[in-house]
Image (cartoon, rainbow, N blue to C red):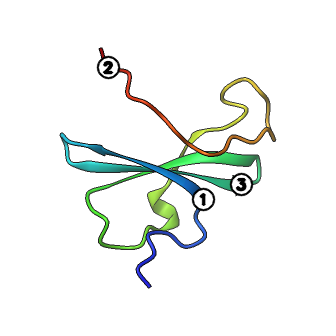
Amino acid sequence: MGFLTARSGGVGAAYFDAPPSRIWLFSHVHQQVGMVIRRAAVKNLTRQLEEADWATVLTGEAIGLGQGVNVESPGFTLNRP
């Protein structure tokens, strides 16, 4: 059906990192510690992402709010002059 993901998260955001030509995809998903934000970095969008493609990049505990606090709806901006 052409889906990029299947039950591996929601409310996506993406960024194209020109050198080295990687696409960063961000999504939130529920895990045992609550909702977390994950990232997959891929060269292209020609296949459906698998669980192994994702790495957790943000949790409630990581930002000092404690385990079980949800972080959702990823969005970002580049920190450039």
Give the crowd class for mark 1: few <14, some 14-19, many >=20 residues within 10 Å: some
- Furthest residue toward top: 81
How crowded pointer 3 is (Cα within 10 Å; few <14, some 14-19, many 20+) is rated as few
Q: Amino acid at mark 3?
A: Gln
In terms of depth relative to the viewer, which is nearer, 14 or 63? 14
Residue in the picture at 40% in, 80% down: 2
Is 52 on the left or on the right of 34, as rendered?
left
Badge 2 is on which residue? Answer: 80
Residue ID for mark 1: 10
Q: Position of residue 31 (x, y in %)?
A: 71, 54
**Residue 53 sits in quarter:** bottom left
Per the model, the C-alpha gap separating discs 3 and 2 is 32 Å
Comparing labels 3 and 2, the label whose residue is closer to the camera = 2
Helix, strand or loop under label 2:
loop
Instruction: From the viewer's side, name the closer residue of 79 and 32.
Output: 79
Amino acid type of the residue tagged 2 in the rendering:
Arg
Residue located 73% across and 23% down the image: 64
Q: Residue at 79% x, 36% y: name it.
A: 67
Image: 69 above or below 41: above
Residue 59: percent from the left, percent from the top? 66, 38
Q: Which image quarter holds the C terminus?
A: top left
> Where does residue 8 sit, x and y in percent of width and height?
58, 64
Which residue is identified by label 3? 31
